[in-house]
Image: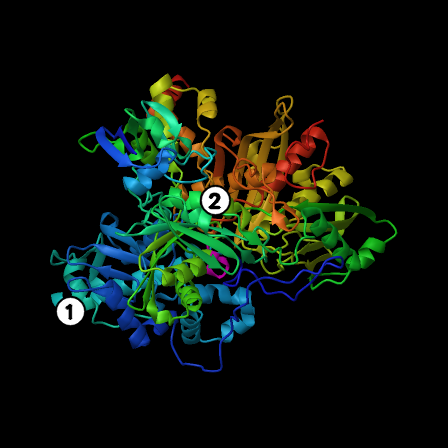
Amino acid sequence: MAIAFTVNGKPVSVEADADTPLLWVLRDDLGMTGTKFGCGIAACGACSVHVDGNLARSCSVPVSEMVGKSVTTIEGLKSAEGTLHRVQQAWIDAQVPQCGYCQSGQIMAAVALIEKVGTPSDQQIDEAMTNICRCGTYPRIRKAILAATGAAAAAEGAA
Amino acid sequence: MADNPNPDLDLPETTAPAEKIKRKGIKRRIFLAGSALVVGGGIFGVWWTDSSVKAKGNALIGGEGKPAFGSILTIAEDDTVTVFSPHIDFGQGSHTALAQMLADELDADWSKVAIEQAPADLAFANAALAKGFLPTMAGETLAGLIPDAVIGMMARSMPLMITGGSSAIRFTGEIAMRRTGAAVRAALLAEAADRLGVPESELTTADSVVTHAKSGKSLRYGDLAAGAAQRSLASDPVLKARDQWKLIGQPVPRRDIPAKVDGSAVYGIDFTLPDMRVATIAAAPVRGGTLESVDEAPAMAVKGVEKVIKLPDAVVVIGSGYWPATKGLQALSPKFTDGGHAAVSTPAIYAAQGKLMAGGKPDNEAGEGDVEAAFGAASAKLVEAEYRVPFLHHAMMEPFAMTGHFKDGTLHLWGGMQDPLSTRAKAAKAAGIDVEKVVFHPMIMGGGFGRRFPDMVEIIDQVAVVAKQVPYPVKLVWSREEEVRHGTYRPQSSARLKASLKDGQITAMRMDYAQSGNAEGEVPFIYNLPAASRRHFAYQSNQIDGPWRSVNATQIGFYTESFMDELALAAGADPYEFRRKHLPEGSRHLKVLDEVAKRAGWGTPLPEGTGRGIAIVESFDTIAAEVAEVALKEDGSPKVLRAFAVVDCGTTINPLNAEAQIAGGLIMGLSSAMGEAVTLDKGAVVESNFADYPILKLADAPPAVDVHFIDSGAKTGGIGEPGLPPASPALANALASLTGKRIRNLPVLTQAKA
């Protein structure tokens, strides 16, 4: 069946079985491979995207539920002029990625958190950032989130 | 990741008394020179006097306006220096660090240095690696007798293009990159001296420019490269002294990171070709089992499924995409044999290992002094303990994926492996074609941690066989379930430790351990004791045991460093002070231990409900000591609140990346100790995915890891692995200090609960 929705601001229409996970439509049908496959059971978060602004693990969301919705992937975070999102820039500044495979999902989760709460506390970061990173980049992920929201600078200023 | 290029040693078959388990494993490649000896100079004499190898390597990386040097770098007319790494980079950051080492000696402009993966060709077989590993493999004496030219030949004949054993920096970087940079700089200087008609001694180099201060004239490397490439390169160039380094030791940002934050980095699993199909696979649930039968019809009825292929031990479904292939596979009910391994289970393996050690016939014994005599001394206080650790899954975040296209007699492969050259050889063998008819295109990898050594990677054979049967390119992708259940795990292992104490000092220590591989020569025993013995009892289950980040140092470190705390307790001593007493005065180890104790505030009061533990392990020529501060969560599982690491790896090439490697290793070590275990029942792996194989998440990792390096200037050590081994004993020691309960079996889970 033809399913019409929006990806990174552009309308798309795909022929796919209703139960096909959004992840595989993005990767195999639309050729957008920045969103990664890690587990297929929504346990690791490597496939995280935003659906109508909310964080979703695309490996476990059927594409049929996307009708009329707006999906944002890692490829869609930059501005129209190509400027990196402040969270992406913070990731570079803090030298977060090692193998890098989980980082698309980590960044999507961090952006969703910041868009929701503004300047997250350590506890909010703990609760929201449930994506798995086997390389163990967690301390730098935390640092980058705090830097992106100015929380690190504020904390330093207060100290 | 092992101590040698043959990480899974082919040990004599040892079968548990109660079970008849066929050794399933990997043939050991012999790492010894043949009878043919070739006279040669230094290590670069090999690469540069073997004209056919040099020509081929340079032709593959160089070109018009971009002359190549020593099969390692090119210098373009616009001054761009491109460094070709024989190592893959799967997240450890060695590409940037290797280029730093070369560029520093070359005096290159860092902003114009690019880094690429060397092609998977024999011309890039890594002689530096062969030379670095040789003393471990053959012993210092024999290694010293083998001419470097033969080592180069060996590297090509093995063939050797491996990444593992934390070897990139300490061997390839120190032996190949720095010397090549220095030799090419010398050639550029000579060329400039001739062109300017001045003595070389009046020339200086900086930022890819040769300058003659007296005349004010200068020449860019891009101008000089073509001429310099015609000159012979010095075998043994003069290297910079430490105080002349400009790039080595600097925290330069990694070059691969920008593409990893915007989704543009293309991993093996992302590769695509026009007309490509996607396949997925289910292998026999019991390792060693075979495919008995399968009715293909249910899969073929799934929309998008194109073909079902039977392999001796697996079934493959090819579809228009991963999802149709997966649905097709799930529709099948293949029948597999258990290969005669139905009796294999986690408890049965521990029981068999216990019996083996009780039998007292080790395969290998190392150590010195009379342990038995010390144990029998009248005044000796004896302490004994048994420890167990489970199989561990590598859990690289990118599941295995490899694309194959067999066209006009040539098999093209795209994917990521820790050894591009042996990937070709293995694929050629599986496909039944000549190795020259296999082209491997190395791609970046979403982790590896030891899982991507071609010898143990089934997907290479699977893709080679499948690609030969279809007219289109096919990408085979493993599900996470396939990954978890068909790993080449860190071995399940048991140990018995025994020591005698007198007047608060250890008089003798023995460690018996049962597992597949022999760790001797890999994990040095660091304590200064009158008598010490380590005995290895070879035990092989039906699983394939592989190198898992830091290899045997994980379990050996856990055993030894947990036991040191038990001995401290028996001696009534503080664990840190007790270790100090058994480390040589003035040693690097003692400095590392003292520094971590200082930084962690050892001995200062802790908040209620918090415990502190310390451990020190040397692996891959690097000494790492760590302190963990831990509390218990409501469910009784541990939470690490603070972590400290002090590391002496000789020289820290890139502190920014080295810090990440140490912190990441520490966290991976904590993760494995806290919750990870692959268990077996009826010969098959019980766990299936991250739901039942828990990886530590951000909330349970220490918020920050305090990492400090001591630049002792000693021989450069590895950095990718040594941060991991001290983590699990530091955690167990912290829990014991908090609860009084000693955890001897991993994972910890909720064992520390009161």
**Image position, residue B530 (x, y; %):** 73, 56
**Where is mark 2, residue-wise?**
B331
Residue B212: quadrant of the picture? bottom left
Q: Nearer the viewer, mark 1 or mark 2?
A: 2
Give the camera-side residue of B431 and B729: B431
Residue B484 is inside the magenta segment? no
Tell me if mark 2 has few (under 14), some (14-19) or many (20+) residues whose alpha carbon lies within 10 angstroms of its own: some
**Image position, residue B321 (x, y; %):** 35, 45
Q: Which residues are magenta?
A: B452-458
Q: Is residue B746 left or right of residue B182?
A: right
Q: In the rendered image of this protein, does residue B206 appear above or below residue B250?
A: below
**Kind of residue indicated by mark 2:** Ala
Q: Earlier in the sequence, mark 1 or mark 2?
A: 1
Tell me if mark 1 has few (under 14), some (14-19) or many (20+) residues whose alpha carbon lies within 10 angstroms of its own: few
Q: In the rendered image of this protein, does residue B626 appear above or below residue A69?
A: below
**Where is mark 1, residue-wise?**
B194
SS state under label 2 = helix
**Kind of residue indicated by mark 1:** Asp
Subunit bearing disc 1:
B
For image coordinates 60% across by 45% down, the residue present is B678
* Viewport quadrant of the C terminus of chain B: top right
